[in-house]
Amino acid sequence: MNFNHEPDGFHYEGIIIRPPSEAYSILIQVTLGCSHNKCTFCGTYKNKRFAIKPDEIIQQDLAFAKKYCRRQDRVFLMDGDALILPQKKLTWILDQIQKELPWVKRVGLYANRKSISAKSDEELAELKAKGLGIVYYGVESGDDDVLTAIRKGSTNAKLVLEGRRIIEAGIKLSVTVLLGIGGPQRSLEHARATGDLLSRLDPDYVGALTVSVIPGTPLADDMAAGKWSPLEPSKILVELKELINATDLSHGMFLSNHASNYLPLKIQYPRDKAEALKVIDAALAGKVPLRPEWLRAL
Ligand code: SF4
């Protein structure tokens, strides 16, 4: 087991990830892995068995943050779906953050359909009252065929229903979608259905990533077996254009500036939608350079 137990450091186990917007946050690992851990493209937690970390370890990490992280005013709770924690444990963690790190203004975590549906509306409201300010929600696609193929464990309708409950609780919602995950066969259906899902969710932020094939994942096996293939960059752009065209948000920010993408965009909806479509057309015509393959990263 890779157990990093420095006497005066955070107790991180294995690979840890956080959203790009949490780059300067205090990262506290409260669970290990992901309770779902079945998505075919995701290799992040394949070698980690899901577990909840003990109170004493979390307390020690908060004590470390209290000493050394006084200039960071956000906390991100890891790993892959920390919302799955039992309500009592999660509210205890939020209480401890308020007590030990009173300068912290926002707490965020990852969630999936399963972890949101395990909470009642009252529980979500309680989490909001105790400082949970943002939920990062990976939906990947709005296309039910794609969702089944990637073993997301949900449907378009359920993803919208559960995501809306976060917004109704007053918590900010940041949604991730995955360009290219439908392969060439379902590229445009994936784009249109995902745009439809985003329009009905109407989140605060959308992050569009481009799928990368991680060795050892079921997606890599599907590719080797010829059941799935990646899109070439120009087809990813066509898909992105279709997605933006099909997405109507009342206020949100749509970002495709993740390192995995070929064309970084920052679109404030609804204001910038038409301009963004023009930029994609220019990129398709070769007038805007794309990020080269070697600069793309997860
Ligand atoms: S729910 Fe998220 S963390 Fe879990 S397997 Fe799927 S993509 Fe990975």
Image (spheres, rainbow, N blue to C red):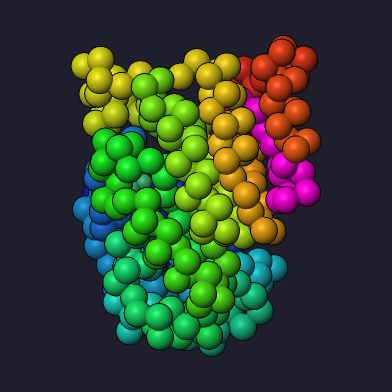
200 relative position to 213: left or right: right
| Residue drawn at point x = 29 percent, y = 72 percent | 118
Residue lying at 45% horizontally and 71% vertically, measured from the top left: 165
Residue 173 point in image, percent of width and height: 54, 62
Q: Count numbered badges in the picture.
A: 0
- In the rendered image, residue 199 lying in the magenta stretch gets the answer no
Q: Measured along the vertical axis of the image, is residue 218 above or below residue 233?
A: below
Q: Residue at the spot x=40%, y=20% of the render?
A: 184
Q: Position of residue 214 (x, y in %)?
A: 35, 29
Query: What residue lies at 72% left-to-right and 12% top-to-bottom?
Result: 286
Instruction: Tell me where residue 112 sits by quadrant.
Output: bottom left
Point out the stretch of residues depicted in magenta: 260-273
For residue 224, side relative to residue 78 (left or right): left
Q: Position of residue 196 (x, y in %)?
A: 50, 47
Instruction: Name the residue furthest top.
Output: 286
Position above or below: 285 against 161:
above
Q: Main secondary structure of the magenta part?
A: loop
Q: Nearer the viewer, residue 145 or 286?
A: 145
Left or right side of 252 for 114: left
Residue 24 percent across, percent down from the top left: 63, 57
